[in-house]
Image: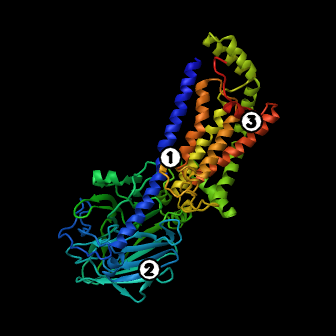
Amino acid sequence: MENNRNFFITIALSVLILTLWQVFYMNPRIETQRETARIEAERVAQEQKAAQPAGTTPGSATPAAPQAGIPGTPTTQAAIADRAQAIAGSGRVALDTPSLKGSINLTGARIDDISLKHYRVTVEPNSPVIELLNPQALPSGFYGEIGFVGSEATGAVPGPDTVWTAEGNQTLTPATPITLTYTNEKGLTFKRAIAVDENYMFTVTDTVTNAGSADVALSNYGRLTRFDKPLHASTYVLHEGLIGVTGTEGLQEISYSTIEDDKQVLPGKSTDGWLGITDKYWAATLVPSGKQPFQPRFSYFDDGRPRYQADYLTDPITVAAGQSATVETLVFAGAKEVAKINAYEADRQIRQFELLIDWGWFYFITKPMFWLIDNLYKLLGNFGLAILATTVIVKAIFFPLANKSYKSMANMKMVQPKMLEIREKYADDKMKQQQAMMELYKTEKINPLAGCWPVLIQIPVFFALYKVLYVTIEMRHAPFFGWIHDLAAPDPTSIFNLFGLLPWGVPAFLMIGVWPLIMGVTMFLQMRMNPTPPDPTQAMIFTWMPILFTFMLASFPAGLVIYWAWNNSLSILQQGVIMKRQGAKIELWDNLVALFKKKPTPAE
């Protein structure tokens, strides 16, 4: 029985460690690789400014029914490397808001030049700003387009090649919308008003006036097209790719690899919702008008240049002779800031827009965790301090359970002489030894696994905090104090180059910084507050676990390591107070001495 129990404990701890390693270890490394690759891509782009545009393919993509009417996207065989050159190749209207800068392409009225003023590629203040939407000619082409599908009766209608005329104001700001016009050969006049708020939402209002003598019918379409995808490997902790909430299906999350295999995902028709393409921190989405049912679609095309697309096509809209019809579409292009996303959902009545942020299956823990940290940040002015304060609050919530566990451990320490006596008495009969131990536990009201509870109850909180640090842009590049300039990135120091004093690059697996070491030491001390397990296997696991966790957590976000170290420190104080009140001797020093004391050999 004793051997079986030890075996299962060993297996459980091993599974826990392996799970933490699998779920958490690779993600910070992937994020670092992503930032490095992005910087490298920008460097290459700067070095290739002399590159020239190539021709386009004569054909264009033809989407499958029922969206066969959406015009295809001409695909460039070799992309232009220089952004300025790509932008200069077409007429444009400037865009300038407190959050965005860029321009609107008058060809197709495309929103294809969007930079985020408040976000940079790296934590360095002179780092380039994030370029979210880019002209089609760039390798990172990514744009939004709204147009119409007509018939012979309607004549030519606005599409990807339509050259719009800008009226009056030539700069789009929150205070000054722009108006674009286009009139075709059949007497249809299209007037497009584009407005933008101070954050990331565009409102595109199309008014179609029929000056002809017959009624016409046409459909409205919108699409987001992207020619590249994130440079890092995808993870199951976070969704990046095609996304939307429409129809009875609700949330649709389609990865790049899935759409590459399936080519097309066609949800049912809808009268509300949204769809788009999301990255970890940024996204672009379309919110079709609710006046007409629309068919959403997610696609991958591999003709010419491969590209990913989220689009919709409305049912036909009839415009009577001498009358007008209006269609309004919302376009979001920006950072996935929690407060702004929630405000858009409430103010614009966008169905479940909050799901643009991947809170995960445990959203009921993750969202309250973010809410608490964010509000404490507003009070304290530093996300690191907010994490420390959150730890205190979480400790207070779990105080009764932790107290019960620590009391049980204190009692276990007090009955250790009786436990040793039982082991000696039944040294040759493991079954009777186990029965006597269980009777002792029952009599003294001791839970032998009570010491595991303080660690186990941290796991959901640990995961929720990790998710918050990983997915919320508010934590991106958030500084703490000293050398921690980004709580969402690993501690940049390493003991193996004396924290930067020695001039040599440390391999990634040896990047054991100051905070991981503090975490490891506090975890070690906390475990030494407990009675030493009498079983050699358990004792070995308890000895090596702090070392394993130090290496594993070294590549975790610094904010998470700081949380764990601070939580361990509070646990040591709490456990010490409880043991003193219970009259149990605090043998931390004795345990440390016994650990390093030379054990006598059998001959001695």
Q: Amino acid at mark 3?
A: Trp
User: Comparing marks 2 and 3, which lies closer to the viewer?
Assistant: 3
Whether residue 183 appears in this view of the structure is yes
User: Comparing marks 2 and 1, which lies closer to the viewer?
Assistant: 1
User: Comparing marks 1 and 3, which lies closer to the viewer?
Assistant: 3
Q: Is residue 155 above or below residue 461?
A: below
**Left or right: 577 as drawn, with respect to 347:** right
Q: Which residue is mark 1?
A: 24
- Secondary-structure class at tag 2: strand
Quadrant position of residue 225? bottom left
Residue located 40% across and 79% down the image: 103
Q: Position of residue 459 (x, y in %)?
A: 58, 42
**Foreground residue among 393 and 314:** 393
Q: Earlier in the sequence, mark 1 or mark 3?
A: 1
Q: Amino acid at mark 1?
A: Phe
- Secondary-structure class at tag 3: helix
